[in-house]
């Protein structure tokens, strides 16, 4: 969802989508259409992808092409992040991007579960080790199941995340999308931005009368506006404006 929102924010600002590349499973095309490029590694063994330089180069070099061609959003699957960052280190990617004038921004979505938090922290540490001050880093707290992050406040991982913020890592929090239209959209495999495009069909399936439709539309668009405000300066190209 974070990747789709960043691409849609860019579209609102620029009147066109950025380069959108999905590394792993093809899902973003459901939201953004057939302009999305997808890299699906030929093997499922991520350890081999991380230790085989030739295989990593063949898989990940298209990422570099997208980054230098235009403003880009690259959505990396959780299991692909580690070999991708390792490839970046061994292929001199930080130096190459700096020479080509590419400003890199790592955005780590974090859901309220321990595994996601741990994976985000590990990938954040790895990315900062490789790119250092040559990139920006942001964690996006996404309360996807509405359980909240309160239960994490006493955990070491949450404390580490706060320490990262003190060390210059930004934190943003996406608002909850609490409306019946969004709930139905989720059950049908849609993200909240898609619910806006399919609002009439979803409202008809729920049998909403005109006042209820108006209320649901207001909730959905209010969520979208709040999410946009949270992520506005994370979209591609915003680094140059700061």
Image (cartoon, rainbow, N blue to C red):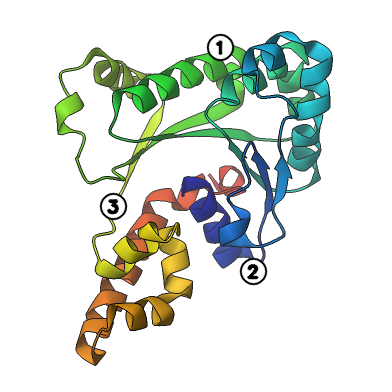
Answer with left or right where residue 5 lies relative to residue 13.
Answer: left
How far across and down, in percent of the image, does residue 191 sit? 44, 57
Say the numbered circle drawn on residue 175. 3
Which x, y percent locates residue 229? Answer: 38, 56
Look at the numbered disc 2 and give the secondary structure of its residue.
loop
Q: Earlier in the sequence, mark 3 or mark 1?
A: 1
The single residue placed furthest to the top in the displayed view is 51
Tell how many labels.
3
Mark 1 = which residue? 129
CA gap, disc 2 and disc 1: 35 Å
Of the two numbered discs 3 and 1 in the rendering, the one whose residue sits closer to the viewer:
3
Q: Secondary structure at mark 1?
A: helix
Q: Earlier in the sequence, mark 3 or mark 2?
A: 2
Label 3 CA crowd tier, 10 Å (few <14, some 14–19, many 20+): some
Quarter of the rendering containing residue 11: bottom right
Q: Position of residue 56 (x, y in %)?
A: 76, 20
Residue beneath disc 2: 15
**Foreground residue among 42 and 20:** 42
Horizontal and vertical percent position of residue 54:
84, 15
Of callouts 2 and 1, which one flags the residue occurring earlier in the amino acid sequence?
Answer: 2
């Amino acid at each position: 969802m974070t990747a789709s929102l960043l691409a849609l924010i860019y579209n609102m600002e620029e009147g066109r989508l950025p380069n959108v590349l999905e590394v792993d499973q093809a899902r973003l095309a459901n939201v953004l259409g057939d302009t999305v490029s997808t890299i699906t590694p030929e093997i499922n063994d991520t350890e081999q992808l991380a230790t085989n330089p030739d295989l990593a180069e063949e898989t990940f070099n298209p990422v570099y092409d997208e980054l230098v061609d235009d403003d880009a959003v690259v959505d990396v699957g959780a299991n692909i992040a580690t070999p991708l960052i390792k490839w970046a280190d061994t292929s001199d990617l930080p130096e190459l991007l700096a020479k080509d004038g590419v400003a890199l921004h790592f955005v780590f979505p974090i859901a309220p579960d321990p595994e996601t938090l741990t994976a985000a922290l590990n990938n954040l540490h790895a990315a900062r080790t490789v790119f250092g001050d040559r990139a920006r880093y942001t964690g996006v707290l996404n309360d996807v199941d509405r359980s909240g992050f309160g239960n994490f406040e006493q955990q070491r991982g949450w404390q580490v995340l706060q320490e990262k913020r003190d060390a210059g890592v930004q934190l943003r929090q996406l608002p909850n999308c609490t409306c019946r239209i969004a709930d139905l959209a989720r059950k049908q495999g849609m993200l909240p931005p898609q619910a806006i495009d399919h609002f009439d069909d979803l409202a008809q399936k729920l049998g909403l009368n005109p006042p209820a439709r108006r209320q649901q539309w207001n909730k959905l668009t209010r969520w979208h506006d709040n999410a946009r405000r949270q992520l506005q300066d994370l979209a591609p190209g915003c680094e140059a404006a700061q």
